[in-house]
Structures are given as structure tokens and as C-alpha cells.
Image (spheres, grey):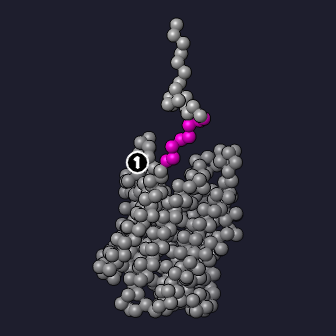
Amino acid sequence: MTPPQRPSAASPLGGNASGPTEPAPRRSLGKLSLPLLGLLSWLALAAAGLVMPKWLSFLVTMAAANGLVSLGIVGLMRGGVVPFGQGMMLAVGAYGAALLFNKAGFTDALALTLAGGLGAALVAAPLAPLLSRYRGIFFAMLTLALSMVTYGLLMKVEWLGGSDGFNLGRPTMAGFKLADAWSGYALYLLTVSVALAMALVARLYFDSTRGLVTLAVRDNELRVEYLGGSVRQAMSINFILAAFCGGLGGALAVLSLGHVEPNFSFWTTSGEFVFVAILAGWQSVVAVFLSSLVLEVVRSFSGSYFPNTWQLALGLFLLFVIRFLPRGIGSLWMKAPGQGGEDAK
């Protein structure tokens, strides 16, 4: 009987004669292409802003600002919770930027935007450990209650403008005062730049170890704890990051509107952000901003032609998406389960 042959050095079972075979390095084409994709998107949006009419430029600006708030909600949805009080973070960012402009004399648009995001994150930091203990309807109602408490305070405090809010002037860019003809485009460019940057960061975060732990929390919290992960820490970090996104969106929105009011924290405002997040789904970052743009377009045109029934049009559209795209608009360019490959960016 012929003795069995020993695997050679080139055999996949034998490895290298001098030691174990090291796996060939894998190139992450998806992550390498993200900055290039972001740059191309920025160039396309910057060029489009030069030719689009002012009303459309303002519409895209508001869609990008509101999309940042919904992006934070999507990050929480990946962990299995849905906040119904994200309008609170929008209001904190908006009022923070407006107060710095009017009371402290800070006028730089980028600095005000970052201040709004950081202010919302600081407000969320002490609340995160408490909220991370709750799930389902309890988490949703707690966030809604906090948002309505904020709304009540903003309505009653006269120093903050009361129910009417207050106005703010035109911000500066890198120390330069914006001309009337270019102020709208400059704010548009700032908003889409911040939105693109946060979209890239969110995509990288979702694909990171921490982001994958968030998905595991949604599927099985107990297993995550058994494997050594901290569910409460993961959810707390997600809540603070969602607040930062909401604060950025609030600051950018108030810079474009030139006015801030308590309705930023009202429950219907929070509901619109949840609407966008459900419409987009939790898989794709791009779908969040597309859904936000859809909401702004439908609201604008329906409000003009059907002023009393535009909410009905939004509701019917959402029912259509839930029926035929239960995973959201982002599932249109996602690979079906079992086909392999990475999620669409």
C-alpha cells in the first residue's frame, strides 16, 4: 500500500516550510473609496449650488441640516431604540448657536455650528447613563418627555424670547462678512460640507467594531454581555453621538432661517425626524439625506397646492414605503441577504 504523501510547502494544508503561512493582506476598497466618493459628491453639490435657484438651494440646505438630526436617530435605531425627543437636541444646538451670536458676539458660521453640536452633546452626556437602561416604548416616552420639558421651558423663559423666539443676523465665514448675493450659497456650501463629513464619519463608525456591537445589542443584549461587551456603554455613546448630530443640524438650520423658536423642540418636529429615519432605514447613510430631501420637497409642494392635506400625502407615502420597502429606501441598493459583500455605502 502506498504511504500517504506529506503535504508540500505550497499545499494549503502544509503551509510554508519555514513556518506558518501569513494571510495575504486584504485591501479595504470600500474604506479607501469613501474619501474619494465624498470629495466627488462635494464637488458635484458645490457646482449644483451655483446653478440651482435660490428656493431650491434653501430647500437642500434645510434637508441636509434636518438630515443630520435623523442620522443620529438612525444610529440609535441600529441599537434597537427609537427616540421621540430628538427635537430637544435640535433646539439645544439652535438656541446655543443663536445665543452665542446675539449675546457673546461669535459670528463665525463654522464655529457656531460646532458649538451647537458640542452643546447638545454636553446636555446629553448626563442623560445618557439613565436612558441607556431603557428600551422600547419606555425609551421613546422618556426622550419625548425630555423634549417637551425643554419646549415648556423655552416657552416660559422671556430671556430666550418666549413663545416668539428671537432673530439673529447674518453670520461670517472665516472672518469675512457675507454679501447678500452670496450668503445663501455660502450657508448652503457649509451645510452640505458638514453633512457630507458627518455622513462619512457615520459610515466608518457603523462599520467599526463599536458600530457592529450596536447591531449585536439590537439582536441579543444578553449575548453581548456574556462576550464581555457593555450594552449600556454602547448605547450611551450612541445617544451622545446622536445628540451631537442633532446639535449640528439645529445650528445649521437656525443660521439659514435667521430665527429660532420653541417649536424646534415640539413633539411634531421630533416626529418628522423619526419619519425620515423610518423612511430611510438603518442600513444606508445616503438614504437618510435623500429621505430628508423627499420630506422637504413633499412638504413644500403639498403645502402650496394642498395646504390642509400635506400630512395626508406624507402618511400615504410612508405607508407605501412600509408595505413595499420594509427596510427603508436604503434597501433599494442593498444586497439581498446571503449574497455576501458589504453594505452599500
For residue 293, what is the image quadrant? bottom left
Residue at position x 54%, y 12% from top?
Answer: 3
- Quadrant where the C terminus lies? bottom left
Residue 127 showing in the rendered view:
yes
Nearest the camera: 87 or 196? 196
Dominant SS type (magenta)? loop
Residue drawn 37% across the image and 57% down it: 320
Q: Say if residue 141 shows up in the picture.
A: no
Q: Nearer the viewer, residue 104 or 7?
A: 7
Give the quadrant of residue 156.
bottom right
> In the rendering, at what x and y percent does residue 288 appear?
44, 64
Q: Residue at x 47, y 57 (%)?
A: 31
Q: How many marks?
A: 1
Magenta span of residues: 19-26
- Residue 161: x and y in percent read 57, 89
Residue 92 within the segment the image draws in magenta: no
Left or right of 231 on screen, residue 29: left
- Residue that carries the numbered disc 1 in the rendered image: 335
The crowding category of the residue bearing disc 1, from other C-alpha atoms within 10 Å (few below 14, some 14 to 19, many at least 20), is: few
Q: Position of residue 63 (x, y in %)?
A: 42, 72
Left or right of 198 on screen, residue 298? left
Query: Circle 1 sits in a helix, a strand or a loop, which is it?
Result: loop
Which residue type carries mark 1? Lys
Q: Locate residue 111: give its quadrant.
A: bottom right
Vertical comparison of 108 with 223: above or below? below
What percent of the width, then of the height, locates residue 49? 34, 78
